[in-house]
Image (cartoon, rainbow, N blue to C red):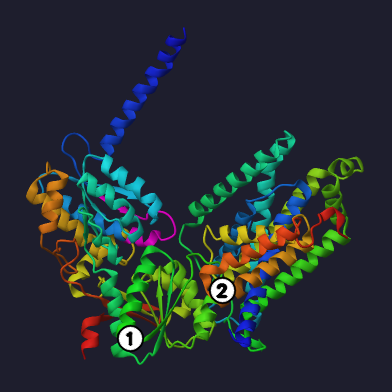
């Protein structure tokens, strides 16, 4: 009696489950030898804009490749959301790994998630090409899967220091980090490089989402520093910039690629004026080489490309290029090996990797907020040369 | 730290503390009448922030407002914040807690419901309003007004301070001098006897929630004006304000004010001395110390027995 009851309930449940998985498979392009490019980044949570900037770049590249007719197979897209949080990153990575069609992943977007997800990807032999994870030590940990298609924070910190040294007469710089992997990593490098050129450095931290930045801002203003570096993301840099202005700080203010987003301008309002922002990224809207990309992007998504949109687009095209050579049935590991050796000339730069997975040529660019816009100033190497 | 720096951080502490105090009142009032730790109050606060934001965005302030316009913007934002806070608190009581009271659910169920409601509400806000933070539209140019012992005070700070003090005095009057206040105190002291004496308990509880919600909503607007509005903005101030309520003696309205002020000041002095990383270490060390010697909090009484 009991047994029949179980059977009666069980059969439809199992059948339903099978049906569901079949449908799920269809979605991600099953049906024998589907090829999917994954993307891992924050698609919800507090820094979602940075994730969306990149997702659109990836999607655009895939769409154009499918439309071009050069491929004899279709490429599908699968996004896994890590909210930019290390603790969510392993589950997100597992989702990408479990989908057998996913051949390579663009991302993870942030440094913390990259650190926690990379052991899984390495084990699965799946290449992850991150257009934005900049924490220096990520490529020192032997993650074979990780290719970092962006100059790391060591270069960014060095760029900041070089600018302070050559182009300003700052004697004392205060560095405020946001206690994230990314912020602290960048702040450490900047501190070391500034001290190396003989500039005095004081450090303090303000945790993300601090309910009131007034006290930290006052501390900076009272410190008599004539330079300030904020190492963190726009969501906190915005209110911090406001409070810094209210506290009456009048030195040189600089932040990083996590802040270089129009959201920073929105949150800080007039207080964003004058901030310098460094970024390993060029500005796709200004650079002649990326103007067409910017126009296509705007047409497709009704917004201008943001930070790392163009880099994500490039990286995706690099993967597509290798897929084209290797064919749709390529093993994950084989594709990873091919990518590690590849040299690809993208819109933003030429991508090729050293044996640790770092970009061979690293350039940092400087921006400044002027009359409500993030204006491109040029590469720091060139700016400090004169 | 020099003396002038001490004054800098003290002033910042008083400003932040007065906001904590206003939020803490919401926790303490509800605890007074229901012995319920309403953890969803932090979300009421967050909705207050969005209330002000939505009203002001809809009105779209001009870029350089005149003095009169500035006052109007602030008034509208504050009223909208308080209104949405009040509505959220009213709905919360009606939907989440009243059915449980009808069924005489055990305390633990209330607590879990409160936490569940909090999760629900902030995720709902994330869906409705988006997950990007948003700044409050500029209502005035935040100029420096005057200095106290070398510590500058700007418009936002003065606005927060004055609004908080007015709200606290108003609330103190309502609780101690009006009919509704005596109802609240009666229910807090002994619900059964109060209902025998003709107090409509449901009405009193509902109104208590609304009062807490109005204050929390206004505080949310002020908080948003000071920094920015985002869907998880309630979490940290909410926890701190709850701690402030306990510190002052939970259930005691004046205690919540004292507790909030004290925590705000300790937090900012800690940041001033040691940096932001120590913010909560300092504040919660004080909490533990006080509770070791006065387990019922600084003022240590309940709503019913004040007055």
In this rendering, the label closer to the viewer, 2 or 1: 2
Furthest-top residue in view? A1
Q: Is residue A244 visible?
A: yes
- In this view, B210 is above or below B265: above
Name the residue at 41% across, 64% down.
A180
Badge 2 is on which residue?
B271
Q: Which type of secondary structure does the marked residue at label 1 adopt?
A: helix
Query: Residue A31, how many percent across, how many down?
Result: 19, 34
Few, some or many C-alpha atoms within 10 Å of disc 2 (few <14, some 14-19, many ≥20)?
many
Q: Which of A191 and A252 is in front in this view?
A: A191
Stretch of the chain drawn in magenta: A38-53
Q: Is residue B29 magenta?
A: no
Q: Which of A260 and A1 is in front in this view?
A: A1
Badge 1 is on which residue?
A164
Q: Which chain carries label 2?
A: B
Name the residue at 25% across, 56% down.
A58
Name the residue at 26% across, 68% down.
A152
Q: Which type of secondary structure does the marked residue at label 2 adopt?
A: helix
Q: Which chain carries label 1?
A: A
Query: Residue B273, how many percent across, how many down?
Result: 57, 77
Name the residue at 62% across, 61% down.
B240
Q: Does the magenta stretch include residue A41?
A: yes
Residue A39 is left or right of residue A330, and the answer is: right
Residue A34 is left or right of residue A369, and the answer is: left
Q: Can residue A70 be seen in this view?
A: no
Mark 2 vs mark 1: same chain?
no
Asked if disc 2 and disc 1 are in contact, CB closer than 8 Å, the reply is no
Residue A239 is left or right of residue B68, and the answer is: left
Q: How far apart are marks 2 and 1 (CA)?
A: 27 Å
Q: Quadrant of the N terminus of chain B?
A: bottom right
Query: Residue B245, how many percent across, how many down?
Result: 71, 59
Q: Quadrant of the C terminus of chain B?
A: bottom right
């Amino acid at each position: 009696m009991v047994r029949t009851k179980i059977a009666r309930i069980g059969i439809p449940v199992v059948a339903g489950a099978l049906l569901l998985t079949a449908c799920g498979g269809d979605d991600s392009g099953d049906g024998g030898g589907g090829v999917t490019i994954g993307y891992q980044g924050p698609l919800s949570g507090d820094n979602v804009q940075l994730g969306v900037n990149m997702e659109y770049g990836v999607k655009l590249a895939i769409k154009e490749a499918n439309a071009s007719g050069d491929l004899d197979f279709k490429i599908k897209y699968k996004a896994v959301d890590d909210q930019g949080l290390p603790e969510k990153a392993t589950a997100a990575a597992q989702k990408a790994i479990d989908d057998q069609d996913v051949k390579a992943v663009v991302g993870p977007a942030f440094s913390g998630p990259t650190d926690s997800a990379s052991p899984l990807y390495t084990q699965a032999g799946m290449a992850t090409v991150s257009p934005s994870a900049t924490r220096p030590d990520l490529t020192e940990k032997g993650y074979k899967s990780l290719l970092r298609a962006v100059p790391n924070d060591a270069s960014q910190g060095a760029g900041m220091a070089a600018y302070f040294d050559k182009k300003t007469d700052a004697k004392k710089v205060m560095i405020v980090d946001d206690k994230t992997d990314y912020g602290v990593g960048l702040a450490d490098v900047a501190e070391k490089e500034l001290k190396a050129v003989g500039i005095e450095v004081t450090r303090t931290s303000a945790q993300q989402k601090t309910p009131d930045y007034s006290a930290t801002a006052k501390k900076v203003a009272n410190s008599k520093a004539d330079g300030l570096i904020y190492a963190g993301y726009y969501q906190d840099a915005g209110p911090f910039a406001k409070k810094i202005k209210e506290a009456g700080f009048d030195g040189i203010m600089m932040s990083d690629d996590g802040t270089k987003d129009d959201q920073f301008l929105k949150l800080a309002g007039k207080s964003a004026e004058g901030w310098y922002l460094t970024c390993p990224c060029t500005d796709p809207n200004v650079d002649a080489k990326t103007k067409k990309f910017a126009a296509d992007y705007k047409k497709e998504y009704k917004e201008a490309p943001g930070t790392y949109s163009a880099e994500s687009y490039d990286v995706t095209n690099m993967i597509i290029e290798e897929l084209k050579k290797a064919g749709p049935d390529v093993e994950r590991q084989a594709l990873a090996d091919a990518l590690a050796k590849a040299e690809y000339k993208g819109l933003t730069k030429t991508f090729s990797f050293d044996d640790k997975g770092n970009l061979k040529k690293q350039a940092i660019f400087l921006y400044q907020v002027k009359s409500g816009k993030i204006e491109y100033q040029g590469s720091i190497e060139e700016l400090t040369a004169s | 730290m020099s003396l002038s720096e001490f004054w800098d951080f003290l002033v910042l502490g008083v400003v932040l503390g007065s906001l904590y105090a206003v939020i803490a009142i919401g926790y303490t009032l509800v605890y007074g009448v229901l012995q319920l730790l309403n953890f969803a109050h932090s979300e009421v606060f967050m909705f207050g922030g969005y209330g002000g934001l939505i009203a002001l965005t809809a009105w779209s302030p001009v870029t350089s407002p005149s003095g009169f316009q500035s006052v109007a913007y602030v008034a509208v934002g504050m009223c909208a914040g308080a209104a949405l806070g009040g509505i959220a608190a009213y709905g919360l009581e009606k939907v989440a807690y009243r059915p449980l009271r009808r069924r005489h659910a055990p305390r633990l169920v209330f607590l879990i419901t409160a936490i569940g409601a909090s999760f629900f509400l902030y995720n709902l806000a994330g869906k409705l309003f988006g997950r990007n933070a948003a700044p409050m539209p500029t209502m005035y140019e935040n100029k420096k007004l005057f200095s106290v012992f070398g510590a500058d005070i700007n418009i936002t700070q003065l606005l927060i301070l004055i609004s908080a003090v007015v709200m606290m005095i108003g609330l103190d009057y309502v609780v101690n001098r009006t009919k509704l206040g005596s109802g609240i105190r009666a229910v807090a002291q002994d619900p059964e006897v109060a209902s025998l004496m003709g107090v409509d308990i449901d009405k009193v509880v509902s109104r208590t929630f609304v009062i807490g919600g109005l204050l929390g909503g206004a505080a949310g607007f002020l908080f948003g004006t000071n920094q920015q509005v985002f869907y998880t903005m309630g979490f940290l101030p909410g926890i701190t304000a709850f701690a402030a309520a306990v510190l002052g003696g939970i259930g005691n309205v004046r205690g919540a004010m004292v507790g909030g002020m004290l925590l705000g000041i300790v937090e900012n002095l800690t940041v001033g001395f040691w940096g932001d990383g120590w913010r909560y270490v300092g504040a919660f060390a004080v909490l533990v110390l006080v509770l070791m010697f006065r387990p019922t909090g600084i003022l240590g009484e309940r709503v019913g027995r004040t007055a």
